[in-house]
Image: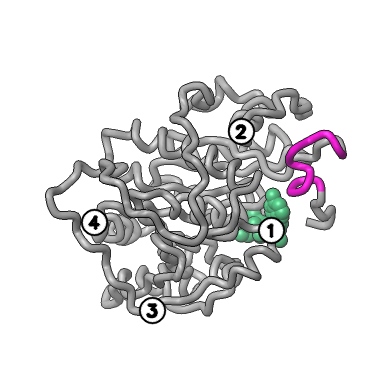
């Protein structure tokens, strides 16, 4: 049985590690909050301040920074839809949810910095969970929006849930050709499928047209080549994959082979330890798996997450 949360001031990652006693099971221990760099002050909403001369997050600073690829299609993200779905709204005042995802992203960025053996792979992350409805897309979108606010990187959010693609829909953006199309047709340049957005530093890659051979396509050597292509096109690019559920579909284990780290979304109120162990086993192709606790059922009134996590609908 899951333990009750006692460290209510910890980040979602820390509290996940507390609820699920997995410290020995995971190869990457959670980094204590005291080791984290200080959380930056909230950014002003209206004016974009000048970019400070900071070293880039992953690549050594070149004398002249390469310009990012220019997308063929640029879309506007529906802020009202984001707000309606309880997602982070870019440029809105910083609230509790934004702070939570700041902490989660810092943890991911610190892990990424440690992956010095493969700097390209360090820029790839998979957001996964055991079952449908655990909140993978919710967390992937929030993480992408939070990471896009960083000064020295650009985020590409890839919809890799081929059976149930949801990213474009969740952002109120029209679908289009994507990863599966580029996988199945070598004449398609995957960069041409990338969709720019009106959120600075955030672009999207749709799942593309599905087929019955999705798992075989994603398991092919071409997947590695396409990911390398996406990373090489922009040295400041971080790629986040929204995954299918690991226990319900096979592509998640294949995708885990290609990423530097996995953010494993768990529901404290319904994910069992057995399910997490099975999921971790399926994702063992990736050495760095971190738990993200989603939708914790706290006692009413007393907790700072009540407004976000206390209103969950039981039907999911
Ligand atoms: N922390 C949260 N707060 C509010 N709503 C949430 C939260 N987490 C998930 N949801 C909502 O729960 C529903 C299921 O979440 P989501 O679609 O992200 O799950 P999923 O794991 O991606 O599911 P699937 O495997 O079917 O793709 C969505 O309506 C989402 O907006
Ligand atoms: Mg989803």
Which residue is under mark 2?
11
Q: Main secondary structure of the magenta part?
A: loop
Residue 54 on the magenta segment: no
Q: Which residues are magenta?
A: 301-310
Query: Disc 2, ligand 1: is the CB inside 8 Å?
Result: no
Work out whether mark 3 precedes mark 4 in sequence or the reverse, and give the earlier one: 3
Q: Secondary structure at mark 3?
A: strand
Which residue is under mark 3?
73
Q: Is residue 67 above or below residue 295?
A: below
Asked whether the residues under the numbered discs 3 and 4 touch, taking CB atoms below 8 Å apart as contact, a structural biologist would say no
Q: Where residue 102 appears, x then y in whole percent?
A: 53, 42
Q: At 33% across and 49% down in the image, what residue appears? A: 152
Closer mark to the observer between disc 1 and disc 3: 1
The quadrant where residue 198 appears: bottom left
Query: Disc 1, ligand 1: is the CB inside 8 Å?
Result: yes
Q: How many marks?
A: 4
Q: At 33% across and 54% down in the image, what residue appears? A: 50
Which residue is under mark 1?
86
Q: CA distance from mark 2 to mark 3?
A: 36 Å
Q: Residue furthest left?
A: 63
Q: CA distance from mark 4 to mark 1?
A: 34 Å
Q: CA distance from mark 2 to mark 4?
A: 33 Å
The quadrant where residue 10 appears: top right
Which residue is under mark 4?
232
Q: CA distance from mark 1 to mark 2?
A: 19 Å
Asked whether the residues under the numbered discs 1 and 2 touch, taking CB atoms below 8 Å apart as contact, a structural biologist would say no
Q: Please indicate whether residue 239 sits to the left or right of residue 100 in the image.
A: left
Q: Secondary structure at mark 4?
A: helix
Q: Quadrant of the N terminus?
A: top right
């Amino acid at each position: 049985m899951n333990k009750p949360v006692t460290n209510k001031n910890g980040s979602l990652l820390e509290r996940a590690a507390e609820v699920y006693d997995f410290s020995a099971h995971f190869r990457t221990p959670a980094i204590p909050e005291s080791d984290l760099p200080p959380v930056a002050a909230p950014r002003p909403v209206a004016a974009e301040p000048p970019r400070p001369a900071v070293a880039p997050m992953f690549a050594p600073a070149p004398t002249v920074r390469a310009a990012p690829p220019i997308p063929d299609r640029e879309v506007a993200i529906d802020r009202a839809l984001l707000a309606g779905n309880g997602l982070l709204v870019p440029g809105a005042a910083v609230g509790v949810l934004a702070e939570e995802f700041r902490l989660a992203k810092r943890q991911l960025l610190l892990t990424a910095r440690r992956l010095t053996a493969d700097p390209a792979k360090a820029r790839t992350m998979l957001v996964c969970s055991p079952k449908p409805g655990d909140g993978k897309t919710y967390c992937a979108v929030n993480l992408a929006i939070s990471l896009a606010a960083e000064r020295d990187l650009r985020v590409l959010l890839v919809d890799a849930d081929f059976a149930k693609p949801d990213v474009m829909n969740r952002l109120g953006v029209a679908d289009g050709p994507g990863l599966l199309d580029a996988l199945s047709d070598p004449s398609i340049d995957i960069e041409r499928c990338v969709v720019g957005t009106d959120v600075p530093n955030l672009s999207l890659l749709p799942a593309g047209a599905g087929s019955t051979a999705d798992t075989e396509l994603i398991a092919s050597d071409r997947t590695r080549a396409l990911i390398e292509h996406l990373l090489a096109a922009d040295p400041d690019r971080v790629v986040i994959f929204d995954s299918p559920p690991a226990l319900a579909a096979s592509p998640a284990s294949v995708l885990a082979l290609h990423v530097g780290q996995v953010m494993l979304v768990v529901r404290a109120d319904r994910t069992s330890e057995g399910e997490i162990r099975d999921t971790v086993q399926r994702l063992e192709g990736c050495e760095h798996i971190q738990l993200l606790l989603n939708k914790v059922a706290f006692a009413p009134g007393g907790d700072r997450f009540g407004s976000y996590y206390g209103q969950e609908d039981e039907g999911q």
